[in-house]
Amino acid sequence: MKVPFAGAIDCDLHLPSPSMAVLMRHMDDFWREQFVTRRIDRMDFQLTSFPPNTPLAMRDDWRAPAGEGETPLDKLRREALDPFGARIAIGSILHGAIGLYNEDMAAVICSAVNDHLARDWLDHEPRLRGSILVMGSSPDHAVAEIERLAADRRFVQIILPVMGDFLPGKRQMWPVYRACEKHGLAVALHAGSTYRYPPTGSGWPSYHVEDYIAQSTAFENAIVSFLAEGVFNEFPDLRLVCLESGFTWLPTLLWRLNKEWRGTRQETPWLDRPPADVVRERVRFSLQPVDAPADGALLTRTLAHIGSDELLLFSTDYPHAQFDGDNALPEGLPADLQRKIMIDNPPACYPRLAAEAKEIAP
Amino acid sequence: MNAPLVDTSVSQRLGIVDCDIHPTQRSVADLFPYLSEHWREHSKSIGPHIRQGLAAMQAYPRMMAAGQRADAYPAHGGPPGSDLDLMRRQHLDPAGVETGMLVALSKGGMEERNPDYATALAHAVNDWQLHDWVRKEPRLRAGVVVPQEDPAFAAREIRERSLEPAFRQVILSPRSIEPLGRRRYWPIYEAAAECGLTLGLHPAANGANPSTGGGWPTYYMQEHYAFGTNMQSNLVSMVFEGVFERFPRLKVALIESGFTWIPAMCWRMDRHWARMRHEVPHLKRPPSEYIREHVWFATQPIEEPENAAHLPEIIDWIGWDRLLFSTDYPHWDYDDPKYCIRFRMTEQQRSQLFRDNARALYGLT
């Protein structure tokens, strides 16, 4: 169904990956020379997780380039910001730099991506907010990047692929989460992998569509990692946001987690209450994709099984092909839940959006 | 005044089929009668060669009593599951087990790297199941264990064992080198389909890959949780790689991974198949249709929603004819048939879940 009112916060929107020519404007001479000499500036950094020409990667009607005299930002306004009435949209650029093994090079590109996001997008469109792209493989670089950009309040989260160099709850990542908590940034995991490991516990599937479906299992294991390692205990103000994760698998996660915990909590004594309660308090999920039958009846029941109206955050996942036309909301969402998802839940999740709202309020 | 004062347990009113019972050797010496001199010597001198850093213990140590029911250790020694009399006394008799499906995980060669040793071990474990268990206890049925990473030998073992009615299925580990839908495993499916044997997928302790797509977990809670995600991945693989198109008679039972995830995974598969179907033109129908036709689900470890009434609702979506009751005896997370089902069922649903579905799937009489 169509979005019934204006003022939503779109929590997962993708901005186009910039060319290396654009990114090199944000680099020093050392790196510019290296990229030119090695011809890295001519390479295509697309990620295996998001082949750009597949039907999922971009909706057909959004594939056309910007029109005559139209800037990429104009196109974004016309296709994503205006039609869905977004008051705020959180944009991200999942650049392929995160797939490199050279951590110094990857970090330089990530910084350039973040500067490009600030200068070429956020500076020109007050509705946009940004995600800080960081390197999960190098917590030192990630912390430095967070500290570098923390003063820019338009960045509201860091973003990492859900499958990276190690499970994201692991202790080597904690300095990153400490920095996020200190600065009021949420931690967003987005569908995708740097393919340090096969995307399933049984090895490499044959097809892209299998890799995509496997993302939901990666989110399950990432959440279990956050819980088991004790991230939520160590960082009581930290929020974990799962982007493009799907959410209809949540009932099984919640039910299994509580049962696992009853049997295994001796090993993780910091888990001092049912993990499903912790998930409902600290983990949030973007709306799209809605993996449920179109008529909405089973979705309504699944939402009842999830047992909370605070977990979902409105998202279009623009320009990925998750819905047709303007029907950014699935059938089966009760009216009061629509308002929660679009208006109330995002500021409750993102400390920086909550702070903004407070400033605006009389 | 003929009504009983105390409600008799499910199992006393109704014989059950337990689809997941684990027999174990007291030691590898139990297999010596079924191994050649060469492999007996190999077992003593060289031993197993698996894909994890610790050769003789789990890299993720189990919680309760090494992952076993603490009361299932035989008084005279040996590991739980190694004593048929104790299994009868403790499980088969009191739980009212009409038929018990053996899943022989231990030393069956599914994790062994040496291909010839794996083949010899699988063959020996199948002999051992037959002679030391099924022939001694008519309630039990065996599952063919195979050297699954060497599919030609696995297929030979399946064809040979299929001649003996004691073997009702083929056991595979989802912690395979490649996802189980990949074509390297198709000779196994060809043999199973030809012989009319169901495939039973059951988690194994050690795998060839990290147990999650994001790397190795730290704690056993995570490793155990990943049993479920790996089962999901293998189901996706078997559907999308076209196994059920190629082998339309193949039947698969997913054992020890719960079942409430099935509907949501079917919705996810159908939805993304609809957009990406040009990549998999060998699929002629939505993925959920293959699953509805070809796949059964064993209940243990049964999910426990805060509201128990949510569980039968999910079973309505899966189909009451698809669930197989299982206990996982003698493991620590045993689902006791007397207590583990905490929602109302009709008599017909009760018979299906505890007995009739398994009878039909495995051809038990």
Image: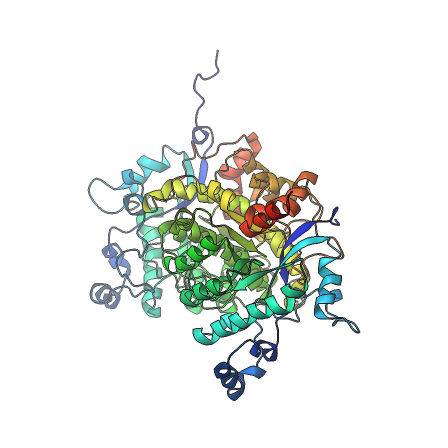
Name the quadrant containing residue B38: bottom left
Where does residue A174 sit, x and y in percent of width and height? 40, 57
Q: In which quadrant of the rendered image does the C terminus of chain A lie?
A: top right
Where does residue B178 sit, x and y in percent of width and height? 46, 66
Q: How many marks?
A: 0
Relative to residue A179, is residue B13 depicted above or below? above
Name the quadrant containing residue A93: bottom right
Taking the image as shown, residue B206 lies to the left or right of residue B54, namely right
Q: Is residue B228 visible?
A: yes
User: Which residue is the extreme one toward the front?
Assistant: A362
Which residue lies at the image location 56% right of the left edge and 36% below the top edge?
B310
Q: Is residue B282 visible?
A: no
Where does residue B272 sit, x and y in percent of width and height? 64, 59
Relative to residue A93, is residue B343 depicted above or below? above
Relative to residue B310, is residue A286 depicted above or below? below
Relative to residue B84, is residue B269 depicted above or below? below
The one nearer the camera, B85 or A66, is A66
Where does residue A141 sit, x and y in percent of width and height? 43, 68
Which residue lies at the image location 76% right of the left edge and 71% below the top edge?
A70
